[in-house]
Image: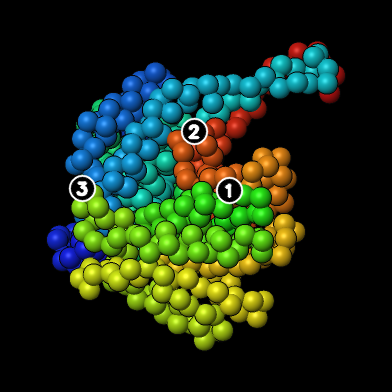
Amino acid sequence: MAYATTNPYTEEVVATFPEATDQDIQTALSEAHAAFEKWRDTSFAERARILNAAAAILRRDIDKYARLGTLEMGKTFAESKAEVILSAEILEYYGKYAEGLLKPESLPVADPAEGKAVLVHEPLGIVFAVEPWNFPFYQVVRIIAPQLSAGNAVLLKHASNLPQCAASCEELMLEAGLPKGLFRNLYAARSHTAMILNDPRVCGVALTGSEGAGAIIAAVAGQALKKATMELGGADAFIVLDDADVEKAAQWAVMGRHWNAGQVCVSAKRLIVADAVYDQFLDLYKKGVAELKAGDPMDPSTTLAPLSSRAAVEDLHRQVEEAVKHGAKVEVIGQEVPEKGTFFRPLLMTGLDENNAARHWEFFGPVTQLYRAKDEADAIRIANDSPYGLGGAVFTKDEARGTRVAAKIRTGMVNINHPLIPKADLPFGGIARSGFGRELVGLGIKEFVNHKLINVVDIDAPA
């Protein structure tokens, strides 16, 4: 059984689910296409009504959805509830703004006699969504909200450890009034990826996941001549300049590295601290991490959740061991964690010089990479010494300076004086090994639409 609910806190297998058959996939494709042909002509007002209804259900039943997220991937109940609210906000955002974001655009032409040019944005068909486990609902909603708003259909392949969350996403949209077939959860096997992407009714794939998964699925999409958006890994820099509010920066660094047990693509994974404030920052950071309490994620006093699986713990331990072999120095900075459950005790990693390959790795869990920067220019150099380009943060009391430094960091997103946290009304995405394409706001809703030119030209206009 490839799809299974395993509680990370108890490591108990709660439920298992069989993979979809080839016929299941073909049925889903046919029903999605039939639903799309009607949905593409459905008014924005009706689409908005359904999205707003889904948001209202999430808000009404927040505890139900949050408990399910905590059960399947282990995040604290408080974090699960915040994720459900964020998902509702995204649905509401597109319910309010989708029509305006996709309104026809008049294009300026050199000579009005040559025509009246308009760019219209039309839906293309079925979008295949491949989503990860770290945000069971947000990852799904940030695809289905814009794509359903645009008039497309969506087929979902969620992470194999989230079968109940995945099913609940489909049930949510059906309860909200979405036509059957327009959005469907599939317990798809790996072999089904090529089957889906080679189907002419499918217009592309949106994936959030690892570099490895992204490379494989992007290759399949390329062979099928289908568009792909890839939101992959990250090793975000968290820069603390010499004029920063060090105490607050340290507090935000603790949160930015350890929320969701450090299993976030935009976690503050690399702390880059100016020499002048390094020692003060390090002392405050260690004290903050030492105050984190690992335990039952349903307990309100728990501030450090277990990792998503036993495999995640073992993989992270192996990665740390490899980094040490390359010369890294590791210090335990967190409290002891329970023996029961898939916990990982927070570590601090230094000694990541130019000869240590681990400086270019993503540690998906509570392992902090720490760098001492000589000055602002050195901090920028270290930040850009990465194969990734997702997000980052800069801490300084001078906003103009922060903006200047942010402009020199080669990533898709940078926050000033705050860790990077997804919002419903801000774009999301990166460059380089962190992928391509954007999600959310106007950029996300236009990823899988036909930007069609319609030009009305005078029949007597010159050629």
Q: Give the tally of numbered discs.
A: 3
Residue in view at x 28 percent, y 52 percent: 76
> Regarding mark 2 in the picture, which secondary structure is present there?
loop
Residue 30 visible to the viewer:
no
- Dot 2: within a 10 Å radius of its alpha carbon, few (fewer than 14), some, or many (20 or more) residues? few
The image quadrant that residue 333 belongs to is bottom left
Query: The disc labelled 3 sits on which kind of residue?
Result: Arg
Quadrant location of residue 303? bottom left
Q: Residue 238: give x, y in percent of width and height.
A: 57, 56
Which residue has dot 1 on it?
A: 245
Inspect the image, locate mark 1, and give the three-letter code of the amino acid beneath it: Asp
Q: Earlier in the sequence, mark 2 or mark 1?
A: 1
Q: Crowding near pointer 1: few (<14 within 10 Å), some, many (20+)?
A: some
Disc 3 marks which residue?
67
The one nearer the camera, 448 or 77, is: 77
Badge 2 vs badge 3, beta-carbon distance below 8 Å: no
Residue sitting at 56 percent across and 37 percent down? 443
The residues bearing labels 1 and 3 have C-alpha atoms spaced at a distance of 37 Å
Q: Label 2 vs label 3: CA separation? A: 26 Å
Query: What is the residue that sits farthest to the bottom in this orientation?
Result: 325
Residue that mark 2 sits on: 425
Look at label 2 and name its amino acid.
Asp
- Taking depth in this image into account, of 250 and 217 the one nearest to the observer is 250
- In percent of width and height, residue 192 lies at 36, 59
